[in-house]
Image: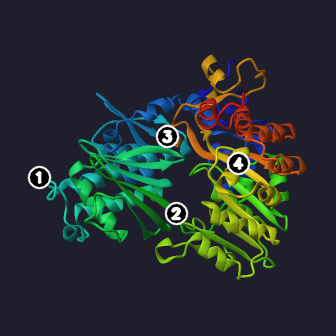
Amino acid sequence: MAFNPQFARLGEVLIHNLAVTEEELKEALIKQNNFGLKIGETLIKLGYLKENPLMLALSQQLQYAVVDQNTLLEVPVETVALIPEAFAHEKRVIAIRLDADGLVVAMTDPEDIEVLDSLKKVTGKNPKPILIGDSLLTDALEKYYKSIRTTSEVESAVGGFDFVQIDDDENEITIEASKDADAPVVKLTNLIFSEAIKSGATDIHIEPMTKHTRVRYRIDGSLREVMNPPVGMHSGIVSLIKVMGKLNIAERRLPQDGQISLKTQMKSMDVRVSLTPTVLGEKVVMRLLDKGEFGFNLATLGFEDEDMEIFKRVIKRPYGIIIVSGPTGSGKSTSLHAALKTIYTVENNIVTVEDPVEYRLEGVTQIETKAQIGLTFGAALRSVMRQDPDIVLLGEIRDNETADIAIKFSLTGHLVFSTLHANDAPATITRLIDIGIKPFLVGSSLCLVMAQRLVRKNCSHCATEYTPTEQELIEAGLEGKDITGFNFKVGHGCVHCDNTGYSGRTGIFELLRVDAEIRQLIFDEANQDNIRDLAIKNGMRTLHDAAINKMKRGLTSIREVIKMTVSDD
């Protein structure tokens, strides 16, 4: 007799679909009561089953359609809003589509009669249930109701705002009005900050456009547009931010920099504010720095095993300079602070001089420079020399003075960590010489240069196999090379990754050890190409090769490799 899932238990359907084994099902049945979960949820908790095979089995057994991820991405917000947020979260349901004969709703349990009856009363529509996985529903509820909340709060904030353009001077909300906690500008600015913190943004961009103000957050290294308040509110938002940052609200012709300290229920933040005048008005860019304890370690940064071994060995040296290079936002500070966290002991006096202090490290003396009162990098470092340090982290080598002090520290028996802006590891060496440091000092003190970048990781929920185009292979430097065994993947976008195809970032690293051969090239003032060739010959993995390794395993996409690195060919 043919197997009919409609007349079978869920476990039997899963075994028939080869989703689980009989032994796994027996174990789940034994532990089900202890967990207080349904059998499918128990199998997932034990790690024997994924959500998609469970949904397929339930669909076959109960004869309900399963929500399609692409459909879920395109649900109109106004349709989702037909069900109140509190009800949707409590009853585990989301509205998908409004048909002529009822409201299509996605539920984890489409046979819950009580919920269906309540839905009919709440919406006034006849509910038509379909299936959805629990984790997918959680992400969808968060995504859509967050959008609904944000939209309604922006509308509430700007609802009472009546803008009449008279002239340039009157095209601004006065600060007196903004001091009112209920003022539209205050409510909107609070919303901008709170949503940025919730989203895990590292930067906020507030910029005037012709017809509106554009607010963007940088998340996972990429900017995302989140809201568009009326352009008439722009100058009021800017003025409020200036007041918060103790800046000159009357100055709109020159760039200004300031700092804001924020404390929310979630966390405390330092905000670095930068304002610059544009033809349409002042643009605000704010860097968000978490004042909480540093939560990274070397194992979570993305090092390959060989690179991790090299890095760990070098950072335990008693003296020398270790430099991490890369552009702004490439994770340099994160790597250095993770290194300090790894080697910290009560026996070592570790001192950092930074601008700003991005991460707090327990047990480490951290100094933040303040150029306006004369506490420059040079002044702070000269003070540190009298503080009996063992290990010094210099936030950035910016000029000859700071580089010279760092060299002196290393040559007098101290281990020095610092950063430098350069394109790759060999270019970092020539950059130090360009700053004015003698080649024999660079060669004598430098023990490791590490260039790094951050690449976005493919979303684990929507990444699928991908066949690169010929042009992509050329741009990635793979034309004509053996790509057998490459696991090319690309995320197509889903509710888990906010339709970007990526979720989180990982580091790619280029480690150049300054051994006797490299040191001799530095002494001989060789160019960076000669240094690079010898380093590669001695086993250095370039940034491009490191990115290819990540892509080969499906961790990132070929598009990220092309975007973030340059082929060595």
Q: How many marks?
A: 4
List x then y, in percent, for residue 515.
87, 51
List x then y, in percent, for residue 411.
81, 68
Q: Earlier in the sequence, mark 2 or mark 1?
A: 1
Q: Is residue 145 above or below residue 19?
A: below
List x then y, in percent, for residue 152.
29, 52
Q: For the residues carrying marks 3 and 4, which lies nearer the camera in this image? A: 4
Q: For the residues carrying marks 4 and 1, which lies nearer the camera in this image? A: 4
Going by the image, does 143 lie left or right of 19? left
Q: For the residues carrying marks 2 and 4, which lies nearer the camera in this image? A: 4
Q: Is residue 541 visible?
A: no
Q: How far is the residue under mark 4 from the one under mark 1?
A: 57 Å
Q: Earlier in the sequence, mark 3 or mark 1?
A: 1
Q: Are marks 4 and 1 in contact (CB under 8 Å)?
A: no
Residue picked out by circle 1: 164
Residue appearing at x 70%, y 48% in the figure? 430
Residue picked out by circle 4: 430
Going by the numbered disc 4, the residue's amino acid type is Thr
Q: Quadrant for the C terminus, please.
A: top right
Tell me the quarter of the picture where residue 406 sits. Answer: bottom right
Q: How far is the residue under mark 3 from the one under mark 1?
A: 40 Å
Residue picked out by circle 3: 495
Q: Are marks 3 and 4 in contact (CB under 8 Å)?
A: no
Q: How far is the residue under mark 2 from the one under mark 4?
A: 31 Å
Going by the image, does 171 lie left or right of 266? left
List x then y, in percent, for residue 264.
44, 69
Q: Earlier in the sequence, mark 3 or mark 4?
A: 4
Going by the numbered disc 2, the residue's amino acid type is Leu
Q: Earlier in the sequence, mark 3 or mark 2?
A: 2
| Label 2: which secondary element | strand
